[in-house]
Amino acid sequence: MHTRASRYVSLLTGLALFAAALWGVSGCGGSQKGADGGTDVLTVRARQVAAAWDGSTAAAAWRAGYYPMGETVQLPRGGLHGRADQQAYEDQNFVLRGTLPGAGPKDGQVTWAGGTSLTRPLVGALESYKTLAGTRVGRKPHLTVTGAKLGEMRVATSRGPATVPAWLFTLDGYASPFKQAAVLPSKLPQPPIRSSRGVPGYPINRLVGIAADGRSVTVVALHGVCDEGAVVDVLESKGSIVLSASVKNQKHDSNCIKQAKMQRVTVQLERSVGDRVLLDARTGQPVTYKGLRGTSPSRS
């Protein structure tokens, strides 16, 4: 049984390597070794995901949509005043002491360099405030919102920096506003490949950020309490970047408990991300930014 399985994996690996030559897929740094021993499985799966996405309708939809890849909030100029205000922000503890605008425009324009634009639905000021404030209303320390108006802000997206509509909230004690994007992200495209449970490790938890030059990506990866941490391998193709998360030196001990821990991991790329789709090998889905505060869930 073991011999048959080994031959099957070897066959898949050979086919994947042959297909890679056709697809122009390359592994960053020439290594795709899984830290927990699932080398062949990780390699094959990453190549399958890249092949499924490259040239697909899902990839075309990704490049035509609006997907934030960085913070959709912007602190007042100069930052927050002291540790108390910082703690209030982290706890999402805001208090409203003013009147917010009523129903505004239903749609707004996301604009990229060169004049390319996309019309997307907007959230109202009150809805935006509710995602900002959370549920800890009135506790101390807190930040006090005294009003808001519709303006603009810059957001990192899958298509590069964009100017988007934003709610500019005035805060008591601050000369410049707190900004939060008001435009809703596009609905994620249906992946052209199904999720796989036969891949070792965990899915990528979320994107943290992309370097200014696009040559490195930081994500949150998961690992357990009975291993030595998470590692993320990267496989690059012309149209996608596939991330394969695994763990180092996992111990198979009966005393181990199933408890996931989060770890930030930065991976280096052979070339800038550009408009390539950032993908998770295990799920076959795009890896996106998920801030603590931001716009409401996307609408199609």
Image: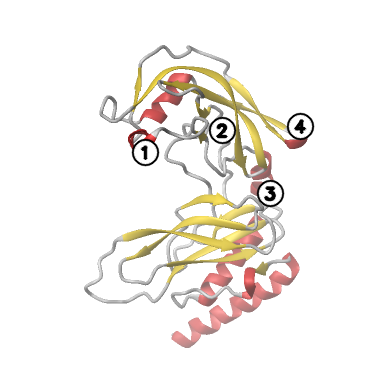
Q: Residue 87 location, x and y as percent?
A: 34, 37
User: Is mark 3 in CB contact (under 8 Å) with mark 2?
Assistant: no
Q: Earlier in the sequence, mark 3 or mark 2?
A: 3
Q: Residue 161 location, x and y as percent?
A: 65, 40
Q: Is residue 159 visible?
A: yes
The disc at residue 115 is 4
Mark 1, other Cα within 10 Å: few <14 / some 14–19 / many ≥20: few
User: Is mark 4 in CB contact (under 8 Å) with mark 1?
Assistant: no
- Residue topped by disc 3: 275
Q: Earlier in the sequence, mark 4 or mark 1?
A: 1
- Residue topped by disc 2: 300
Along the viewing direction, whichever of 117 and 25 lies nearer the viewer: 117
Apparent side of residue 282 relative to residue 65 in the rendered image (left or right): left
Given the current orientation, which residue lies at the most extreme left position? 255
* Amino acid at the residue labelled 1: Glu
Along the viewing direction, whichever of 61 and 15 lies nearer the viewer: 61
Q: Is residue 86 visible?
A: no
Label 2 or label 4, whichever lies nearer to me, is: 4
Number of marks drawn: 4
Callout 1: SS: helix
Measure the C-alpha gap from mark 3 to mark 1.
Answer: 31 Å
- Residue topped by disc 1: 90
* Amino acid at the residue labelled 4: Gly
Q: Earlier in the sequence, mark 1 or mark 2?
A: 1
